[in-house]
Amino acid sequence: MNQTTKTTGSRLGDWLGLIRFSHTIFALPFAALATVMAFTARLPSGETPTLRFRDLAGILLCMIFARSAAMAFNRLVDQRIDAKNPRTAGRHLPAGILGRGEVVMFTAMCSVGFIASTLLFLPNRIPLIASVPVLMFLCGYSLAKRFTSAAHLWLGVALSLSPICVWLAIRGPQSIANPADLIAPLVLAAVVAAWVTGFDIIYACQDADFDAESGLHSIPARFGVAGALRIARISHMVMLGLLLALIWAGRASGLGPIFAGVWVLVALLVIRQHSLVRPGELDRVNQAFFDTNAAISLALLAAGSIDCIWL
């Protein structure tokens, strides 16, 4: 491998690291599950949506562009905060690995790419109309911890928009005109919101002292690590309850016994996640955060897809 290739590969790795591309595995499976459900449930008119490669490409591009824009914006607005925090001082902007100007350009390009994808690839104009408000809400999360401890919930709601947006992109005005058609994606969105809120609180426990000293708002800074972990457990109990509701709400899409059976696995994974983290023992937060959450999202996608497509 020559030096040019190494340099190109290194630069790509820097950009993927900037936006934590590996963490796409948290939100993307739920967008994919919503896609499967939306294509397998009959429309209020009695028809089944037509599956087109162009639609799938548009959904994928929108997910990648929107998430990349929001993550890059987060790194821009948090650059000074990250530089002061020993845990985050090595991130790409405070460490000088990437320049601020090029990250600004990257954020702008991803934002334009997201809006353009809704226009060029998706089958109706609802995603285009909603694209700017959605993008503003996604990016707004990065500012939330400056004024509210509910920043974790903001992130949860931000990620929960993906199944709703996917559903409307595929099923269009018919879905809006028939509110009952929106029950399944709304319940799925609530599952995502409760799940993300809980695990983001766990992740934020690492910065409880720094946030408190810096005047930043977070559940751990406000209630302490022990209190924050209790709130995270409650959030995940709500998530498990909503998953049971989703089994009922998703019957029209084909959710059934496999999805119901995987609930037990998800419950065990949630219990394991909370067993890995205790007050004064935060060295396994990353393991609890990444490995467990990846397993949960992929298990739900696999089970839901099997039910909807093959059973």
Image (cartoon, rainbow, N blue to C red):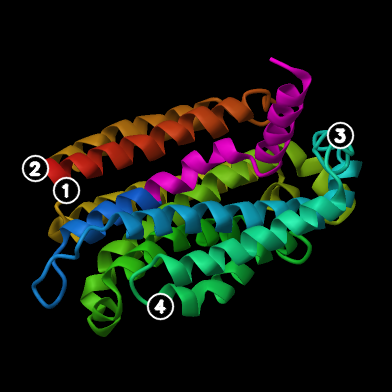
What kind of element bears circle 2? loop
Q: Give the mark nearer the N terminus: 3 vs 2.
A: 3
Left or right: 307 in relation to 79: left
Give the amino acid type for the residue marked by disc 2 in the picture: Leu
Using the numbered discs, state the Cα–Cα distance from disc 2 to disc 1 in whole angstroms: 6 Å
User: Residue 146 — which label?
Assistant: none
Using the numbered discs, state the Cα–Cα distance from disc 4 to disc 3 in whole angstroms: 43 Å
Give the class, few, some or many, for how many residues have Cα within 10 Å of label 1's Cα (few <14, many ≥20): many
Give the amino acid type for the residue marked by disc 4 in the picture: Ile
Task: Report if residue 64 lies within the magenta region.
Answer: no
Residue at 84%, 36% in the rendered image: 97
Q: Nearer the viewer, residue 208 or 144?
A: 144
The furthest residue to the top = 1
Give the class, few, some or many, for how many residues have Cα within 10 Å of label 4's Cα (few <14, many ≥20): some
Q: Nearer the viewer, residue 274 or 93?
A: 93
Residue at 30%, 31% in the rendered image: 265
